[in-house]
Amino acid sequence: MNALLEKYPDEVQSILAKYPSDQAGKRSAVMPLMYLAQREKGHVTKEAIGQIAEICDITVTEVASIIGFYSLYYDEPSGKYHVQVCTDLPCALRGAEAFLENLCVNLGIKVGETTSDGKVKVEAVMCLAGCDKAPMFQVQGPEGLEYHENQTVESALEVINMLRQG
Amino acid sequence: MPMKNMVSLTIDGKQVTVPEGTLIVNAAKQIGIDIPVFCYHPKMEPVGMCRQCLVEVGRPVIDRATGQAVLEADGSPKIQFGSKLETACSTPVSDGMVVIGTSPKAVAGRKDILEFLLTSHPLDCPICDKGGECPLQNLTMRHGPGQSRFVYDEKMHLAKKLPLGELIYLDRERCIQCGRCVRFQDIIVNDPVIAFTNRGRGMEIFSCSEPGFDSYFSGNTTDICPVGALTTADFRFEARPWELCTTASICPHCPVGCNLSVNLRREARANGEVVIKRIMPRQNESVNEIWICDKGRFAYHYTQSKERLTQPLVRRDGELVAIGWDEALSYVAENFVHAGKNFLALASGRLSNEDLFNLSELANGLGGKSALYTHMAGGDLVAQVGVGKATNLSDLGKGSVILVVASDLKEEAPIWWLRVKQAAERGATLIVANPRHTKLERYANQVVRYPYGSEATIVLAMINTMSAKQNFPKAPKFQQGGEAVKTAAEAISAAENLIVFYGSEGIGLEASQALAQACANLLLATDHVHKVNNGLIAVWPRANDQGAWEIGYRPLSNLKEAFQQYEAVYVAGANPAGDDPSLVEAIRNAGFVVVQDLFLTETANLADVVLPAQPFTEREGTFTTGERRVQRFYPGVVRPEYKPDYAITAAISKLAGVNVEAAPLRIFNHLTAKVPAFNGINYRLLAQVSEQWPIIGRSDLYYGGTSYANAQGLGVHLSLPAQTPSLAWPQVSELNLPESMLLAVPVTILYDRGRTVISNGLLHQRIPSPYIELHPTDAQRLGFNDGAQLQFTMGDVLAKAKLHVSDQVPSGVALVPRSLGIPINSPTIIELTVV
Amino acid sequence: MAEHILLRHRAIPGLDQIDTYRQNEGFVALRKVVTSMDPDDVTNEVKVSGLRGRGGAGFPTGMKWSFIDGHNWPHYVIANADESEPGTFKDREIMEGNPYQFLEGVAICAYAVKANDAYIYLRGEFWPIAHKLDQCIAEMETAGFLGEKLFGSNISIHLHTHLGAGAYICGEESALLDSIEGKLGQPRLRPPFPPAVGIYGKPTIVNNVETLTNVPFIINRGATWYKSIGTEKSPGPKIFSLSGCINRPGNYELPLGTTFRELIMDHGRGIPGGRKIKAIMAAGASSALIVANDEALNTPMDYESVPKLGAQLGSASIIVVDDSVSIPWLINKTVHFFEHESCGKCTPCREGTYWMMHLTERISHGEATMKDVELLNDVANQMKGKCLCALGEFSIEAVLSGIERFPSDFTSVTAKSNA
């Protein structure tokens, strides 16, 4: 019984259909399947790793190795929403570092921590290709990924409060 | 094979000519120049990631317009050096190339990379197992900075004693991310159960298989790891390499005959005794290359077990009591003489050629009989159509066909599994015939399924298909198989070379003899006999079964009867009562039973006399591999208070008035004179070595790892008889299984409860409790859940086993692993009930 | 240059809808190549046009297409949409505003190199853009511009999106190949190059989004027309992503050869807050720091001229640095980026970026001496020429140029420490 296959049969099939059906092609599905597995809980569980391994016909170790390598896959739970603020060079030249600091002060947490209700984790990340609209951040959550650009601390807090209420 | 073009180049001023396509690092090696490498290994394709092998590379300048070489004023070719250093491991040679590894620029490059590696590497040398055989250490002494410019507090701290599984430990601080281990597991043995994860400086090795590092070949990664990152639980903190003595040996566990080096040290805590510290591979490119499986590497502790027999025992008033050798031997000889032609020697393939020869000489001298204790037959046919001299599985590729029938090769002979897999990857056509899926099928071009009981039939069907086209004498009434058989037959007909492996998957004596005959017929009918890289190989259960068959041993069809019939039975290296409890009464009530063994086995416990023998590590001898290669092993631990099997037999013989040699050299010479296959072989020939590639050696550790070079002998193939045998058609009966009955069939697993494995605490986690496997449909039909405790009668014995459900089991079949405590020798109908 | 070739949505609203696109020369080029041109002729046209890769390497595109190995099948095309270089946001605007022209370019490339399948590898953060592209692809299939038997021919071309998951290194073409194969996105040893051995061991062409977006116009208007834009060796329009200390950050489509001054002072409206320009990073974080003097500002932005300033044009991600910025602080930022993104495969980059990061941390926080600056210079030089891929090689550019060209920034920050 492969829970991933049972829960999302159509999606799994359309993912597999993108790549060649041989051994090498099946392995390509590991990245989109990882996103699928992460949808429910915001991270990939040990069981899901086994299910992905079965679908792609590779070992559990090969699947798990991907999680550590890529920044957007998580193997541990950490807040329902990730508010990821870019503080890379071009954004930093436009005040992103101060923006992040103020935002965190307002939320009562440090960078990298989660709000007390466990809903929002605030992180500093590398360039998100929004350099002309700094300060900006992205929100990674169960529904997917959303950009919020040309932000002030006030507008950012509004977005975060909506997330915490929803 | 077409000759490759040769290319000439200069490396550090020395000229060398090598085939086109040779990598600079390998060309250098051939003229004694060791370019330091970490990620490169001569058995794997280059990846160019560690950057340690940087050299300056210059190439002759060619005028683009004329295509001519541009010359200097003095007429020598103008050489253009690249602005960047290049990696010697990934650059193929070209004509006129100039490689410099000794210039200030190249040396600085090496030093730079070393400095980078050392910024993260902990100063563990005083406590690191690799110290003394560590390439990083050696290179640092030669090139490296004496002081670190890296602030200690900024060093990354990582896990230092992380078990990847309980057999192999990882020290993440020592790891230099060379990737050799990961690539070995992925590319060479295709068990990708370890991998890199994370990025950048945090990149680390991990395993999440269950059990951890779940691979029969995991120990090899510790040989090729260039630092002390990967160590075995067996050898961790056990000894310093420079304290070790080494002896050449041969693995006693299976018919591959991997060449070993046994490392020894005299220890105070062992009261001044010499102790085995670890088993390492010894290079023999025709047998095991530079690898050994984990069973061979770790399952040696039984030789040093405290439970070993130390003194002869004799039964007095129903109890076994210790006595002296002289008394024991006299008593035994007396009884053997009395038995005369009612004497039986029952020996297994655990014994060496010398041991077996002496036993058979004793039996002959008394007018009695010698027999082979085994569940698998056909060795007489292998003696006639075995592989020809100079056969080397590494030479098989396109144009060769390998047929593996009735054998789960990865469980029965892991290194053969590896070599067959590699042959398939080189283009050989691999046909796997088995009733169920095994781990060899992944590499097979063709898979042939047949029901248990139809092993010989399926091979005979292949012959039938061919005889339709090619006028071979038709086999009587064997018409099974369908498309798969036709395709296989076609491939075999077209094959330049054909090697057939047959095993004992699901079969016992009779069926394996029939199968061997069928395979022999296949080889004969297609003229793939008496040629190099052609012939029949048996996947025996024990190391020297082939030797036994060659010397003339044959199995008995009814052991119970034998114990009842013979007045004296001399059992050596075998435990019939342990393997089959239904023999207990027969042995108990038998006339005079002598058991010669290492441990007080179930059979020994029923014997009249028990004689302690010696394991392979304490004595010398020769084994004959399944490929009919004779190889010699030497004593490592010398224990004068013990006697090896051949010596015990010689002593008994002397007292019994039978002329039998006591010295191994003399025994072997008599053997080679008497047994035609061995004619012309002597110890000197067995000791011959020739240069092997890749060059492995203790003086250069960078390159191939810490496996040992082979200075003690590569072994010699037995001869084949001048005449090829004629076709003989075996009697085959189909197993007609009534509906809703279960057929229990024996299968082999690598880690079983055999004495040599279970005596080792290290492997305990990998040894299963007795279990039985059923298909889910059968389990459901019978009302059993996965994991249920079941029982069934096997012969007269009540066996208990845990149920594993697997959809790879054919329906109507129950798989029963051998040597787990459930006595099964051939397919038997059983009835299962819940405990 | 008045007309937008690439950022056409700025002049044509709704261009991201298929009907609007069709009304504006949409798919004309694709139909032309499939129905009336030989694949090799398509490659030749692109070769003659002089189009060079817009992802940063500037390799002649037509030449790359011609390298595809005709003995090994099938062929693949991969559009590199892993835009992760700090200061780069041009591919994003193309895919958001003018997606069909990009997709048409991918399809034409597939036709030219005889591939039936093309993958668009997007960075994981472009998740909504990938969804948009999936919709566009579906609409193109419905309208008969993708799929089987295009325009009544035997040609079939399928496009698929594939999301990365937050690793800059996957934008490096050989690492991208391993990533799509489901492995760690680490660069491969080259040779062999992707046109010989790509994904699944098959010949593959990897091109940047902007590069492929040029292709429909080259086909429609011809190579000669294309060469009339830009300079002789760097023809065509380029999207310059302008960011940093600038009044008007954003993407600007201008001919190659436009000067820094024109971009920064005219289009970008100069430096805010009355500050003075100090340095220019022309290739995002992978840049050497250009001293922003008159000579630099007057230099044309093309692949031949910028190297005269001791830097590369790269992806034309122009980050402007003003005189309030401390160079030690700046290189600490770039080194942090590379340390975070280093894949770890090769020794010099894995150990070197980690080492440099610790040094730049201390230096930028005033906890270091000039000896540490010298050591930083050493470490960077030690990495040079030894790395497996460009990430390691470029990670040292800002460091080495920063120390060499702005020495006073370093002496002032180290003079404060007692060590």
Image (tube, grey):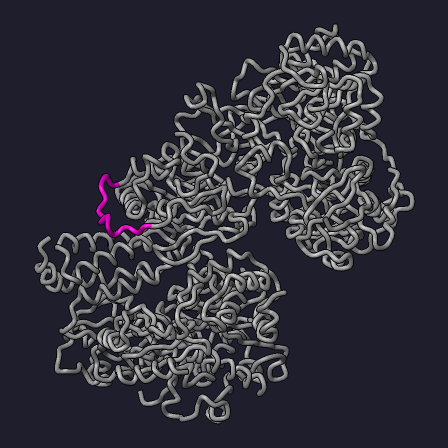
Q: Main secondary structure of the magenta part?
A: loop
- In magenta, the rendered stretch is B145-157
State the residue in front, B359 or C394: B359
Q: Position of residue A136 (x, y in %)?
A: 31, 79
- On whether residue B156 falls in the magenta region, the answer is yes
Q: Is residue B516 visible?
A: no
Q: Residue at x 63, y 80 (%)?
A: C149
State the residue in front, B405 or C209: B405
Q: Residue at x 22, y 67 (%)?
A: C308
State the residue in front, A140 or C388: A140
Please state, as top left, top right, bottom left or bottom right, where the N terminus of chain B lies in the image.
Answer: top right
Question: Which image quarter: residue B367?
Answer: top right
Q: Is residue B320 visible?
A: yes
Instruction: Give the residue at the far right of this rendering.
Output: B476
* Residue B353, above or below C210: above
Q: Position of residue B115 (x, y in %)?
A: 28, 45
- On whether residue A86 falls in the magenta region, the answer is no
Question: Which image quarter: residue B785?
Answer: bottom right
Q: Residue at x 35, y 39 (%)?
A: B136
Relative to B430, is B298 on the left or the right?
left
Q: Position of residue B755 (x, y in %)?
A: 62, 32
